[in-house]
Image (tube, coloured by chain):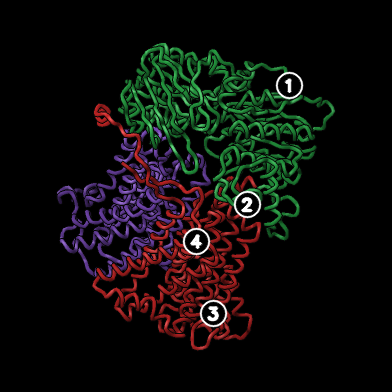
Chain colours: A purple, B red, C green
Amino acid sequence: MATAVSVVMAATPLLLAAIGELVVERAGVLNLGVEGMMLAGAVAGFAAALATGTPLAGVLAAALAGMGLALVFALLALFLLANQVATGLALTIFGTGLTALAGQPLVGRSVSRLAPLFPEGLRELPVVGPLLFGHDPLVYLAWLLVPATALFLFRTRAGTVLRACGENHEAAHALGHPVRRVRLLAVLFGGATAGLAGGFLSLVYTPMWVEGMTAGRGWIALALVVFAAWRPWRVLAGALLFGGVGILQLHAQGLGLVAIPSQYLSMLPYLATILVLVLIHAGPWRRRLEAPACLGRPFLPPS
Amino acid sequence: MSRLVVERRPRPSRWLSWAAPPLALLATLLAGALLFGLSGHDPLAALRAWFVSPLASLYGLGELGVKATPLVLVGTGLALGFRAGVWNIGAEGQLTVGAIAAGLVALATWGTEGAWIFPAMLAAGVLGGMAWAAVPAELRVRLGVNEILVSLMLVYVADLLLKALVFGPLKDPEGYGFPQSRLFDTPALAPILVPGTRLHLGALLALAAVLLAWAFTARTLGGFAWRVQGLAPRAARYAGFAEGRIVRLSFAVSGGLAGLAGALEVAGPIGQLLPSVSPGYGFTAIIVAFLGRLHPAGVLVAALVVALAYIGGENAQIEAGLPEAVTGVFQGLLLFFLLAAEFLVHYRIRRRGPAAAPRTSASSAETAA
Amino acid sequence: MTETVDGPAPLLELRGITKRFPGVVANDGVDLAVRPGEIHALLGENGAGKSTLVKILYGVLRPDAGEIRIDGRPVAVTGPHHARRLGIGMVFQHFTLFEALSVAENVALGLDRWPERRTLRARLAALAERYGLDLDLAREVHDLSAGERQRIEILRCLLQEPRLLVLDEPTSVLTPQEADRLFVTLRRLAAEGRGILYISHRLEEVVELCDRATVLRAGRVVATVDPRRETPATLARLMVGREVREPVRHHPDLAGAPVRLAARGLGLPPDRPHAVPLVDIRFELRAGEILGIAGVAGNGQRELVEALAGERPLPAAEMLELDGRPVGRVGPAGRRRLGLAVLPEERLGHAAVAELDLVDNALLTAWPQPDLVRYGTVRRRLVAAFAAGVVERFRVRTPGLRVPAAALSGGNLQRFVVGREIAQRPRVLVVDQPTWGVDAAAAAAVHRALVALAEEGAAVLLISRDLDEILRFCDRVAVLYRGRLSPPVPVGEVTLERLGLLMGGAGFAGRGTVVAS
């Protein structure tokens, strides 16, 4: 049961970041800056929590920091029509540098962890207590985002318009849908969730600030979206799978059962990501891998 | 009632495409000065420490060459690949594996003489980089797996591999337990070009790479094919340029050059294997490639500029007390401004005369409805 | 040019609409009026400014000058939502549909108020019955035929009860029978008092269907006429403004001519989502022959061109023979060296690279020619001379050889790429939609070049959606339907009706089967 709890914990940042990127990509935008936005969220969340003493302020700051970087991305990629791949990379490089700079005074400090959501009575229920009620609000938010995103995308007008912008932006424009505004909002949402994912790391998971502490989770989240074939529920499954791999590796290291150096075990999440990408491209699911048709393509409305 | 409208230029502006990189650089400097000012440093002193003092000595100039060498090598390879629409983002990993391969040669021959050792290290570095790059290349060609994600994941794997080795089997037996290898023997070190500096043979190899890449892009059918592949993949297929071969070759070239850069780092300025052999050259080279507008000659100039920023960063840390992380901020800013400047090359903003404006109140009501 | 108004007051009036783009005036002081109950044709050749005018009317583009009046009141159409509120419905030439979405979602995306699923179904069913347009709401668009797709667009418009319906080249993707069905629907709509603006360059159908016609040439209105008193020939003169000499094809006797290109059971599975698999395609193309392949867009034309060009190798070499030699496994350059030239439909991004100049675009397919490349290096001077020759011989209007392909008009770029292939003296030339979207003069130039090439003894395969083009220039014709090809027959032995039925799938084995995706 403790393992299940730790898998949920490890899956949460991946889930948050990936569900946001899924919405972004469904709108036809490829933002490779997830890692940078996560770092920004981690450092801003930690700093705000430290300054105010309230972890909840940290959560808010984390989301806002992610959105701030996302806004820069949107400005360049949506309004100045810059190459989305290059802009996303720039966002990650910038985010890495900026957070290393801004985070220097924060190294070695500690904050109080974000408190669990439910009262102690519920949390200490035998067996199911810790797993169902033991988490902090961000975990529940992450899990709630999955059905919420699925409902939004496939059952509401706004969600349908968002998917339409990702499928055929010229047609969406011709029908009068504001393609760039839709994409801007999607990118900001992706920034907020990536920021929250970073905030979860620095406020709950570790909780402290270490330079580059996301350790590639942003990139794994990007792979997760591909793995999930742009479907919310599969993102959840993928996040649990990757979270599980991470926990497996930690356990193996901790127990010292295996006589291999820790570095090799630490490679597991990255190798697993590659393996999963290979499997979904090679397996019988291959023909289901349909990216939104306008993914990564710049759009200039005719005037 | 005039409006500003954005329209695509019939063809890219030639002068702006030359002016864009310097403009972006200037904007970065201004933004940097602002940043220093806001963080309570004297902006002028900081910029001086950054961009002027490193060039004031022969040793400083040599260091410029030392830092620029890996950036030129990696940047040239990446620029060629980016032109072909091949997104090798994992050059940092290929560089690391090149360093490991070269280091293995150096450590295996430790204590022996032979003029072949240094060339063999370079060859091992190239092959190591190529092998690491072959993974994303094959996965993309055979299965259509996104090469960005695979090459990037392998950066983390390569980094952990290097650490596993220097913490483990390659640890210096006489090194008091520090995670580092033996210091390489003299035959395994890169020859120094200018006495009194650390400028090594790698600088000449980097120049050679630029010239070869230039000839390839400007003169050969292969260079043309790569360009078509990058601009219009369907047209490339129609013309008979095999995509699979272009992807494999471009990964081999960029991976090989990154591996060479890694080999030269450990044979040159570092002289042993450490837990980390690169301050992110593989990622910075992405910026170098774009700053150089994906042209080999441009990459050379861009690498020198970015190398200066690196040394300046270290210098500013000492002289002006600025944190080293500022370098990363600078790099990100530079890339942002470059991408923004690119907009002006391809688009223009035009003021347009009044649109058909309704003249009666009835129609305004209609509009408002 | 105005005429006296002799009916009810106009529903829509355009006055002096002007729109400039960099380098061109697309609309220059255009006046036009549509009355209730009228089917009004907007005529003009490609590039005359019809689509621009329609986009202005729908609020997708803003005019630089001029006025739009609805029911006599001037309005500024701020966008498609506004246009729909004003009672304007639009059926675009390039469908505004979303392949991966369901029919219901596609319909809903064109409505201003999000419909309840159940009411939408009921309303659509009622409309479908009234106008004879039936649709399955649950299907995704990518398995629908072009005719069915157009029905989505039309139903989507009709749900809003528009008073003015605008259709941009609606029959270009339909079989003749589907077009007749559409005309019935349009007449019914007009009889209800709606105005219809019907944009076309197909003159026969304008004469048959429309009550009035406004003719646009180079962005200006040159005439407003009653098409029932005109003939296609008089309308063509108004539209083009000058005599365009189309060549005359004399069908040669091909009995003894050698077979140049033969497809022997050519098949190719799909390589991407929504692609059409090619199944058992058979034809023999002889020296001196022009063989036409008709068919509605999206029935495998693109896949056939890729297969013939060698962009995708065939499963077996024997599936395609060139001069008796199996070439199914030979790549594009190898086939070109053997004398097979192919010109795909899409000019920018496939047949030419938008960003590259004309010299580089000449090199794109000419590089396997001897001399242009030596030891892997490109001999730029020779390539430039080759490109200059093409520009001169095929009268490509361009400011120079160093301009990017994207800067040329559709007609001029088509002259260039056709010329590029013909200048390499192919023994077999395959062309896909060679006159799609080009002006009349360029179309005639392309036709002349194809006819002359055949007369010199080369074999030509002409893939086209335009039945007029096929019947006029081809010796034999076959129809492509869902990746299968009907047996070729001499054009003298087919009727338009028979072709139309074939294009709709009648007579094909396994009709209506959609390969599971």
Q: Judge if badges 1 and 3 mark residues of a common chain.
A: no
A5 relative to B178 in the view: left or right: left
| Res C299 label | none
- Tell me the subunit letter for badge 4: B
Q: For mark 4, what is the residue?
A: B293
In the rendered image, residues at marks 4 and 3 fall on the same chain: yes
Mark-to-mark CA distance, 1 and 2? 40 Å
List the residue tagged with mark 2: C360
Marks 2 and 3 on same chain: no
* Residue nearest the observer in this picture, C409 or A7: C409
> Extreme right residue here?
C256
Residue C253 in view of the camera: yes
Q: Quadrant of residue A115?
A: bottom left
Crowding at mark 3 (Cα within 10 Å: few <14, some 14-19, many 20+): many
Query: Which residue is at a point 44% across and 82% down the rendered structure image?
Result: B60
Number of residues whose C-alpha sits closer than 10 Å to that of mark 2, classed few (under 14), some (14–19) or many (20 or more)? many
The amino acid marked with disc number 2 is Asp
Percent coordinates x, y for residue B223 in the rendering = 61, 58
Of circles 1 and 2, which is in front?
A: 2
Q: Can you tell which of label 4 and label 3 is closer to the viewer?
A: 4
- Asked if marks 1 and 2 fall on the same chain, the answer is yes
Label 3 sits on residue = B107
- The residues tagged by marks 1 and 3 sit, at their Cα atoms, a distance apart of 79 Å
Residue bearing mark 1: C490
Report, in whole angstroms, how far the alpha carbon at label 2 lies from the one at label 3: 50 Å
Q: Report the residue at 53% width, 79% height from top.
A: B267
Nearest the viewer among C468 and A252 is C468
